[in-house]
Image (cartoon, rainbow, N blue to C red):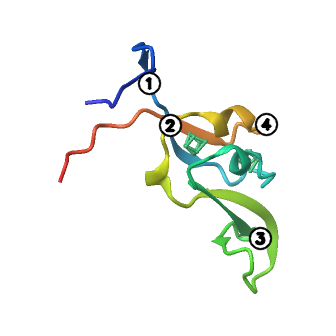
Amino acid sequence: MTYQALTRGGQPWQPLFIQSIDGDACIGCGRCYKVCGFDVLELKAMTEDGDIVELDSDEEIEKKVMTIGNGDNCVGCGACSRVCGKSAQTHGAADIMASA
Ligand code: SF4
Ligand code: SF4
């Protein structure tokens, strides 16, 4: 079953959670990072071979890229998607997780 929420006024609202970031499209501008208030995103680096590595890696870095560091923190607000000029992110609804 898909998780759905309500606005404060009781209207249905569908959270769309971040699912992936296309490392080829992303330019590592950091705009999405700045608007996310839930510590979901993490700036990393991409090598010439397309491998994602830490920013301080000794490997030769081709560019910076945004990654999903803490995906479980996402509340599905969509703010990161609205500021991305490269349409690099994919968002979607999530299934309700069974309680432990
Ligand atoms: S949808 Fe909202 S909470 Fe999730 S990563 Fe984007 S800005 Fe952060
Ligand atoms: S806003 Fe888009 S292009 Fe910029 S870092 Fe985030 S995903 Fe990459």
Q: Label 1 near label 2: C-beta < 8 Å?
A: yes
Residue type (three-letter) at the residue carrying disc 4: Gly
Q: Kindly indicate whether the residue at mark 3 contacts the one at mark 2 (C-beta within 8 angstroms).
A: no
- Dot 3: few (<14), some (14–19), or many (≥20) neighbours within 10 Å? few
CA gap between label 2 and label 4 equals: 19 Å
Tell me where residue 62 appears, x and y as whole percent.
82, 68
- Residue carrying label 2: 76
Residue 37, placed above or below residue 87: below
Looking at this view, name the residue that lies furthest to the left: 100
Question: Which of the 4 image quadrants contains residue 67?
Answer: bottom right
Q: CA distance from mark 2 to mark 1?
A: 8 Å
* Residue type for callout 1: Gln
Residue in view at x 72 percent, y 67 percent: 46
The answer to which of 74 and 65 lies nearer the viewer is 74
Dot 3 corresponds to which residue?
Answer: 48
- Quarter of the view holding residue 12: top left
Residue 65 placement (x, y as % from top left): 72, 59
Q: Earlier in the sequence, mark 2 or mark 4?
A: 2
Residue at 63% x, 42% y: name it.
Answer: 89
Give the residue at mark 4. 85
Q: Is mark 4 within 8 Å of ligand 2?
A: yes
Q: Residues within 10 Å of mark 1 (few under 14, many from 20)?
A: some
CA–CA distance between discs 3 and 4?
23 Å
- Identify which residue is drawn at 77% across, 46% down: 31
